Image: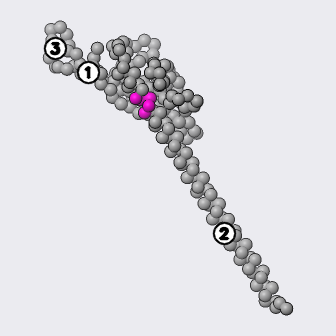
């Protein structure tokens, strides 16, 4: 035969077990939300790394275009879309909107061609990173300070290459990289 106090105790065990289960559920939900937040951070870092790699590939491709160009002097002339912009380009140019990049920049392709760019965009489908670049004339430094009777001496031309790429996503900002390239004057 069971006593009345035993019946009351079995009800208390049930209540304590339910409270413990509720506490464990709250802890599990908190851990789940923390894990989801860490996954978002990891995905964002991955997209940033992809954008950095695309911008770096674009920068190196633009440098290769300039170094391998047979007629560097022709690049210095400006028609409708400059291949090398004159000194004094807007210093905020790398941070302009996509429309500025569409109108003024060049796209990087593995074919090493001067192709008008679209705005820095996420890569998709092709093997080429989705980067854009522009080149700005920086300075020309002669080999000698003496001016010969037949004109100024040959020297080195310095240009600044600016590349940008974005990896996509709602929180994605373009990665902008710059380098300075030296090339013998034509």
Could you tell which of marks 3 and 1 lies nearer the N-terminus? 3
Nearer-the-camera pick, 171 or 50: 50
**Could you tell me residue 32's position as x and y percent?**
62, 57
The quarter in which the N terminus is drawn is: bottom right
Circle 2 — which element?
helix
Classed neighbour count for the residue bearing mark 2: other residues with Cα under 10 Å, few (<14), some (14–19), many (≥20): few
Check if residue 169 falls in the magenta segment: no
Task: In the rendered structure, find residue 23 and report the number of the disc placed on it.
Answer: 2
Residue 147: % across, % down: 16, 14
Q: Earlier in the sequence, mark 2 or mark 1?
A: 2
Query: Which residue: 14% across, 17% down?
Result: 146
Q: Which residue is mark 3?
A: 147
Residue nearest the viewer, comparing 139 with 96: 139
Quarter of the figure with residue 81: top left
Q: Quadrant of the C terminus?
A: top left
Residue at x-position 26% and y-position 21%: 156
Magenta stretch, residue numbers: 56-60
Residue located 48% across and 24% down the image: 109
Label 3, label 2: how many angstroms apart (C-alpha)? 86 Å
Label 3 and label 1: CA atoms lie apart by: 15 Å
Q: Residue 125 appears in which quarter of the rendering? A: top right
Question: Which mark identifies residue 156?
Answer: 1
Q: Is residue 98 visible from the viewing direction of this image?
A: no
Nearer the observer: mark 3 or 1; the answer is: 1
Residue 149 visible here: yes
Q: Position of residue 98 (x, y in %)?
A: 52, 28
The residue most toward the top is 150
């Amino acid at each position: 035969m069971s006593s009345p106090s035993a019946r009351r105790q079995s009800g208390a065990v049930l209540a304590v077990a339910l409270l413990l289960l509720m506490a464990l559920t709250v802890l599990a939900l908190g851990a789940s939300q923390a894990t989801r937040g860490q996954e978002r951070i990891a995905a964002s870092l991955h997209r940033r790394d992809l954008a950095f790699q695309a911008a770096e590939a674009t920068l190196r491709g633009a440098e290769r275009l300039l170094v391998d160009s047979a007629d560097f002097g022709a690049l210095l002339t400006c028609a409708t879309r400059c291949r090398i912009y004159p000194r004094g380009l807007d210093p905020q140019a790398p941070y302009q909107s996509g429309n500025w990049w569409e109108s003024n920049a060049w796209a990087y392709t593995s074919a090493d061609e001067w192709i008008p760019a679209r705005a820095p965009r996420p890569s998709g489908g092709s093997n080429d990173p989705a980067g854009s670049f522009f080149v700005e004339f920086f300075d020309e430094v002669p080999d000698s300070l003496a001016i010969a009777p037949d004109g100024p001496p040959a020297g080195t031309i310095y240009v600044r290459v600016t590349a940008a790429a974005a990896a996509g996503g709602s929180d994605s900002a373009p990665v902008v990289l710059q380098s300075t390239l030296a090339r013998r004057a034509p």
